[in-house]
Amino acid sequence: MTCSPEALAASSTSAAIDAILAPLRHRPSLTVRRSMRRVTLTPKYGSDAVEVDVRYAWTGAPDAPTLIVQGGISADRDVVTLDRGAAPGWWQPLVGAGAAIDLNQWRVLSIDWLSPAELGTNAISSEDQADALAALLQSLNVPQAHAFIGSSYGAMVGLAFAARHPHGVDRLVLLAGAHRPHPLATAQRSVQRGIVRMGQASGQVNEALSLARQLAMTTYRGSTEFGKRFAGGPEFRDGRFHFPVEDYLEHAGRRFVEHFDADRFLALSESIDLHDIAPELVPVRSTLIGFPSDRLVPLSDLCELQSRLHGSATLEVVDSPYGHDAFLKEPEQLAPLLRGALN
């Protein structure tokens, strides 16, 4: 061995790197636990405590700190899929080994949203979902989640969680979600629910649910994207003119009907509009992420949220043509923000 200063420095650097990487090298293999736990909670719109089965997935290194990750009302517990042969999770580009939410460092916990039928109530609140997650953490012997990362409805539930269970989470990372719904967004969702109820009354549930989803898609995306993608002229077929955007919307409606139930849609859509959390009750540090093209959650609402939160809060603004769906469509821009917020 050459004892030159350069060799000693290289040896010292190599030893330091080995010391840093050793815990990762010796971590057990990534695991996925998809299971169910029965927990007890008292629904906001009920009078008695109920037992409810919470379906969850817990994915990552078994000895890693837990992150709660929740998405919009159509998202499920499959945030990420480790099986290469399976369909990808709804946030697959941002969650995985070496990804922004690195499963070598974190263990991601997510649930399927509860419904009023499971609670025995007529409505379900963001607080109910938050209480279910808190009870699940207790059942899994996790005293505190390192962070609650919520997008859209998940961000609303994250705020409810931190307000009701402030010791259960160290920090919030909230994308495209605020302390209350904007009245214009409530108006748009109200029309969607009216369409579905009319379909239920007339025996055309699938058609109505498809139309409601199509209308919702016009609120999820930004005007710029629609202008670029669907600027062409109409095509005459099947006895009428079809505009370029129609095929896209009809496809989105069909896909939604294939995996979503009308009653579940009505309940979770209504739950968004029932959401109302006082930011002053949230003491944990927060990172807010908003999109100027988002017409459902305008930046003005996030600015108000930031100013009223009891804990320290930063607001990150990400420019995107994708509107509310930017939290799904901008992994490259979101990755460094998520890494920074977690670390």
Image (cartoon, rainbow, N blue to C red):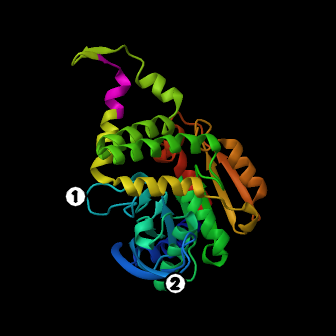
The residue at the point 62 percent across, 66 percent down is 160
Say which residue appears at 51% left-offset and 73% top-offset.
133
The residue depicted at 29 percent of the width and 45 percent of the height is 203
- Helix, strand or loop status at disc 1: loop
**Residue farthest front in this picture:** 201
What segment carries the magenta color? 241-249
Left or right of 320 on screen, residue 303:
right
Crowdedness near tag 1: few (<14), some (14–19) or many (≥20) residues, C-alpha within 10 Å: few
Q: Does residue 114 show up? A: no
Asked if the magenta segment contains residue 17, the reply would be no
Query: Residue 127 lies in what quarter of the image?
Result: bottom right
Q: Which amino acid does label 2 sit on?
A: Gln
Total of numbered circles in the picture?
Answer: 2
Q: Determine whether, in the image, residue 262 is placed left or right of residue 190.
A: left
Q: Name the residue under label 1.
A: 85
- Report the quarter where the C terminus lies: bottom right
Helix, strand or loop for the magenta stretch, by majority: helix
Q: How far apart are marks 1 and 2 (CA)?
A: 33 Å
